[in-house]
Amino acid sequence: MKIKDYFTPKSLVYSGKYQNKETQIRHIHYKDDDVFETDKMDIKDGYKSYIQVIGLNDVEKIKTLKSLFNIDDLIFEDVFNVTQRIKIDVREHYIFSVIHGIFTVNKKNIKEYMSILCINDVVISFHEQEPWFLDTTIKAFETYPEIRRKSSDFLFYHILDLITDNHIDVFDELNETISQFEDITLNEQILPQEEFYRVRKAFVRLKNNAYYTLQALEGLMKKSHPLIQKENIEYFHDLLDHLNRLDGQINIARENLRNLVDVNINNQSNRMNKIMTTLTLFSATFIPLSFFTGFFGMNFIHFEILEYQDAIWWFIGFCVMVIVFMVWFFRRKKWL
């Protein structure tokens, strides 16, 4: 970071690239038997809330949430700093989480930043742009009664689980690409370098997301925060199991990538050795022919063999015999 870009602590300055994105509020009010949506931040008595803040450009509008729920300025500083690392920050009355999701769109992996505040009966998620990947969560309020019945920590779990499931899907697609690379390598073909390093880079990002989310969630579970209800602890442990398995699978896949690099280098080395062997054998075959050509081409005054009428054909036949003998010799030695 350059000195000119430095902001003092608790500075609420959006650091992302969507500077022209208008800030919108999507507020889902829900309880056991009712769900409705507004674009206001007001809390309804008897209802739990899920608030999506879409677009982080309007700092003053978003600061309303800070005063409404008594959130520390340092937390909102992390909300606007979209380069913040993955973490789960535990405070006395709320839980704050920073998530970097990876999703596959049109066979391309894209990154999405989001941060989540889990408060008693309220969950707030912050996004740079429209969170299309949470459409399933919005629909769940209508189709999944349990999400309406349970406390806000269950919604917090649900969002983390949805992102983790997407990461598993991304891993499966990348792993399928590795299988294709293995087929190419076993056939001793050259790996497509650009595609290979794209996949390798995607695995590094996926590894970082899975590992740091796992570490942060394990830290949350050890602290026994009052917002995490006992009835929902089993869901978080199940999510930990998914993250552990994903982290282990990524480690195995990355090891396979390293092995593919080694095998690909060996294949290229073997291919180059074959080429050099072929060129060497051709050179070795023509060495005696070059000698004979030079010998019989010497400008002596008396060279009786050159005076024969069919000397040229005898010479050509002799050269053919030399070539046949050399080929036979190379094959016997298994050099060809």
Image: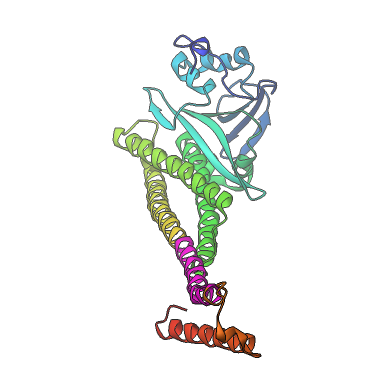
Q: Name the colour scheme.
A: rainbow
Res. 138 visible in picture:
no
Res. 127 visible in picture:
yes
> Foreground: 30 or 2?
2
> Which residue is pictured at 59% across the width and 34% down the height?
30
Q: Position of residue 20 (x, y in %)?
A: 70, 21
Image: 159 above or below 249: above
> Which residue is pictured at 34% across the width and 39% down the height?
218
Residue 284, magenta (yes or no): yes
Number of labels in the image equals 0
Q: Position of residue 171 (x, y in %)?
A: 50, 52
Q: Position of residue 79 (x, y in %)?
A: 51, 23
- 28 displayed left or right of 240: right
Q: Which residues are magenta?
A: 267-294
User: Which residue extends farthest left?
Assistant: 222
> Which residue is pictured at 47% across the width and 60% down the height?
264
> Foreground: 142 or 202?
202
Residue 130, magenta (yes or no): no
User: Which residue extends farthest front?
Assistant: 301
Q: Position of residue 25 (x, y in %)?
A: 65, 25
> Which residue is pictured at 61% across the width and 28% down the height?
128
Image: 50 above or below 33: above
- Quadrant of res 23: top right
From the image, give the main secondary structure of the stretch colored magenta: helix
> Foreground: 291 or 6?
291
